Image (spheres, coloured by chain):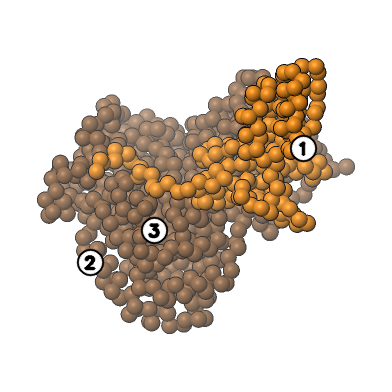
């Protein structure tokens, strides 16, 4: 056995990683996003995507949706550390596989090419609530809303149909049914 | 129409309403309006330090020895960046600090103005929360909130950054009503069911141990009293972390000494072999657990902590109890008294074998060292200091390194809030300014900083503060001319390559003391040590005590890195018996 030359112990066993969607309700004040993001970077947690906007202008509440991966222990720590921040009101955590929750991302695709190609592209997008936002005789911009992996797949497959630019949001989440997260 | 007050006046109104008696600070351009207002508030005394880091540590010493939040006042830019080390230190060791910093005027923020820095940005990761005051109307609300955040739940530092123009602007100051209800960030969420579960585990256990930490001290003196009752009511052995020393009497028979990297053989082995570990207000720090995969493999672990994020952070526990230590212990005692009034008697038989085993570990006498007639052994120096000061209700601060561990091992505390040391961050230079703060809080008490010559030089300028305010602190330097702990690690892990750990040009500490206008004492041999210590105690002025100790001494026992609790390196006596030579030590 090689001996440790460090004053610290060696890292223990690695556990399995899960993807979680963390939703945080915060006071919409200066620096609040920096606090949340800084907590992630400072403690070495991942951020896969991030979506944030004010949802209640009267109460000044913003809703931050973060997609992250980590071991169950790390996910627990993320939630508990977030709850300690002063401007944080509540924290919800959903597994990506959770059937009771809707996750959606939006993407804007810009296609350049002939009519035929653009028609094919629009067809391919149709099952993801495609909306044409802009059209010229050689280009178009299409908006779709879908799951992360569906958008991943689309942006890969549509390259051959003249996809030249992709812009996408982070995931946003909401529970199904009449209940809301308390 | 209520009277309008300036921002600077509001700062002092808030401090008065929070019953602040002392602020530790250093003036500068961006806080001048606040300093200008100081003269009008006689109930608040300002302590002028010599460096803002000193202000932070002094406020920490004040807070930890008095249980009240420490208040720091610094200017913008370098004033704020200098206090960052102290804020981080307070964050790691859960010390309530309120730091007020000046900032350049609002319209200059973001223009790289003179002495501007992004103070809230820099201090965001090292405070519980911080605020940049952008509107004078928010000022009083923010300062009161700052005190609330600093002192409730798990305590910690906060910072309020006040631009200079806000300090001049005027608004009214609403009457302050102290809230009895604590904010939403406090978690006293344990249930009687959890307590019942714990008592059940306790009555079944054959090898129990209490593992206590700084949370007991932070919970207030009543928590320490209750802890004594709890140990008396159960007869369980108890060990403490570095920060928890003093919450249980160090000379009590149930006390196994400190645990962890430089903890006693009995404490660490008991932690490893126990079947029930009850963690009260400690956080499974890596200096405590050693190798996490082999940490106490056979035990059921119970964790009592006020901070839910401490639970399962490093070690998975079986029964978490989230709450204030004082209320949890008091519930446990009540439950035991009600459910099992004869707990100690019925339990004595059950854990007698465990105590026998602990007795065997104790026979190792792991804190022993080979004393000398020619040179002062550092352990001997701490022991003599303890014997000569133990009846005086002494307050001890330390720097960081070997001397800190020797102090923790050989100075026995019997009351909480008497031991101030930088544990989490391990800040060299903590002890001297902390002693200043402790002496401010306890003017009549004996305050000793057990120091190393390397650490103390990092904040030696605060001797000037001690002299200015007639604070008779005693700086007891164990001088081995090395950064001793660095040298020890280099000896054990880096083939004795003593890279840069020797200080070749040390000052003459006796002359240095005289230069500062305090008293210098030097002890060179063991036979003059007692007399010199007594001379130090009897001097009613600040003293720098230069205690020349053995240069080669190592701090044992020790758990080497990456090892579990039951693989300790013991001191030289044991190593001689087991014929481990100097070379063998490096192989462990």
User: Who's the residue at 76% across and 26% down the image?
Assistant: A119
User: Same chain for marks 3 and 1?
Assistant: no
- Chain identity for the colour orange used in the image: A
Q: Height in image: B191 above or below A168?
A: below
State whether residue B64 appears in this view.
Answer: no
| Percent coordinates x, y for residue B212 in the rendering | 43, 60
* Drawing shade for chain B: brown
| Percent coordinates x, y for residue B32 in the rendering | 65, 28
Q: Which residue is mark 1?
A: A129
Do the residues under discs 2 and 1 have CB atoms within 8 angstroms?
Answer: no
Nearer the observer: mark 3 or 2; the answer is: 2
For this orientation, the residue located farthest to the right is: B1
Q: Which residue is mark 2?
A: B360
Question: Which numbered circle lies on residue B24?
Answer: none
Question: Which numbered circle lies on residue B240?
Answer: 3
| Percent coordinates x, y for residue B7 in the rendering | 73, 35
């Amino acid at each position: 056995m090689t001996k440790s030359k460090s004053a610290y112990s060696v890292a223990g066993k690695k556990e399995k990683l899960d993807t979680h969607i963390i939703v945080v309700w915060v006071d919409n004040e200066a620096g609040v996003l920096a606090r949340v993001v800084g907590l992630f970077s400072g403690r070495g947690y991942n951020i896969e995507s991030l979506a944030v906007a004010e949802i209640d202008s009267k109460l000044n509440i913003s809703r931050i949706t973060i997609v992250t991966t980590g071991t169950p222990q790390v996910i627990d720590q993320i939630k508990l550390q977030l709850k300690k921040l002063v401007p944080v009101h509540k924290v919800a955590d959903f597994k990506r596989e959770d059937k009771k929750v809707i996750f959606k991302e939006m993407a804007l695709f810009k296609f350049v090419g002939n009519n035929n190609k653009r028609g094919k592209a629009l067809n391919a997008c149709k099952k993801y609530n495609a909306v044409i936002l802009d059209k010229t005789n050689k280009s178009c911009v299409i908006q779709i809303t879908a799951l992360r992996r569906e958008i991943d797949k689309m942006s890969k497959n549509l390259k051959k149909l003249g996809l030249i630019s992709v812009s996408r949001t982070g995931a946003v989440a909401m529970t199904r049914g009449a209940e809301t997260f308390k | 129409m209520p009277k309008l007050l300036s921002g600077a006046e509001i700062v002092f109104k808030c401090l008065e309403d929070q019953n602040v008696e002392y602020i530790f600070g250093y003036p500068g351009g961006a806080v001048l309006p606040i300093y200008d207002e100081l003269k009008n508030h006689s109930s608040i005394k300002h302590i002028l330090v010599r460096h803002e880091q000193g202000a932070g540590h002094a406020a920490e010493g004040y807070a930890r020895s008095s249980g009240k939040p420490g208040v720091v006042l610094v200017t913008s830019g370098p004033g704020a960046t200098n206090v960052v080390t102290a804020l981080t230190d307070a964050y790691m060791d859960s010390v309530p600090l309120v730091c007020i910093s000046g900032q350049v005027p609002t319209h200059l923020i973001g223009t790289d103005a003179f002495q501007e820095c992004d103070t809230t940005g820099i201090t965001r990761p090292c405070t519980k929360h911080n605020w940049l005051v952008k509107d004078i109307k928010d000022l009083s609300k923010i300062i009161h909130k700052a005190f609330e955040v600093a002192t409730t739940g798990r305590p910690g530092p906060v910072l309020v950054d006040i631009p200079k123009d806000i300090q001049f602007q005027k608004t009214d100051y609403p009457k302050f009503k102290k809230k009895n209800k604590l904010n939403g960030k406090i978690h006293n969420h344990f249930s009687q069911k959890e307590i019942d579960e714990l008592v059940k585990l306790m009555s079944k256990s054959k090898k129990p141990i209490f593992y206590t930490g700084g949370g007991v001290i932070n919970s207030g003196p009543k928590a320490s009293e209750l802890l004594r009752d709890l140990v008396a009511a159960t007869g369980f052995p108890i060990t403490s972390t570095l920060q928890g020393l003093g919450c249980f009497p160090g000379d009590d028979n149930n006390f196994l000494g400190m645990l962890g990297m430089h903890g006693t053989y009995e404490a660490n082995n008991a932690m490893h072999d126990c079947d029930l570990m009850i963690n009260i207000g400690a956080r499974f720090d890596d200096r405590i657990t050693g190798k996490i995969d082999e940490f106490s493999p056979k035990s059921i672990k119970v964790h009592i902590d006020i901070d839910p994020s401490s639970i399962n952070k490093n070690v998975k526990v079986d029964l978490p109890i989230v709450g204030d230590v004082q209320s949890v212990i008091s519930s446990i005692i009540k439950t035991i008294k009600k459910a099992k009034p004869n707990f100690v008697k019925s339990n004595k038989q059950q854990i007698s074998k465990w105590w026998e085993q602990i007795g065997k570990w104790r026979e190792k006498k792991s804190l022993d060292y080979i004393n000398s007639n020619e040179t002062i052994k550092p352990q001997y120096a701490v022991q003599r200091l303890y014997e000569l000061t133990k009846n005086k209700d002494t307050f001890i601060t330390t720097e960081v390194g070997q001397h800190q561990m020797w102090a923790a091992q050989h100075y026995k505390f019997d009351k909480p809030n008497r031991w101030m040391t930088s544990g989490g961050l391990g800040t060299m230079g903590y002890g001297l300014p902390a002693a200043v703060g402790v002496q401010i809080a306890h003017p009549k008490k004996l305050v000793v900083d057990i120091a190393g010559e390397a650490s103390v030089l990092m904040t030696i300028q605060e001797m000037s503060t001690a002299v200015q305010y007639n604070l008779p602190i005693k700086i007891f330097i164990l001088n081995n001319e090395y950064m001793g702990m660095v040298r020890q690690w280099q000896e054990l892990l880096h083939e004795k390559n003593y890279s840069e750990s020797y200080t070749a040009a040390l000052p003459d500490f006796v002359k240095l003391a005289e230069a500062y206008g305090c008293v210098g004492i030097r002890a060179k041999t063991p036979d003059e040590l007692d007399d010199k210590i007594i001379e130090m105690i009897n001097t009613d002025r600040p003293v720098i005590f230069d205690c020349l100790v053995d240069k080669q001494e190592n701090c044992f026992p020790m758990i080497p890195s990456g090892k579990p609790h039951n693989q300790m390196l013991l001191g030289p006596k044991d190593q001689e018996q087991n014929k481990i030579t100097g070379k063998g030590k490096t192989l462990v």
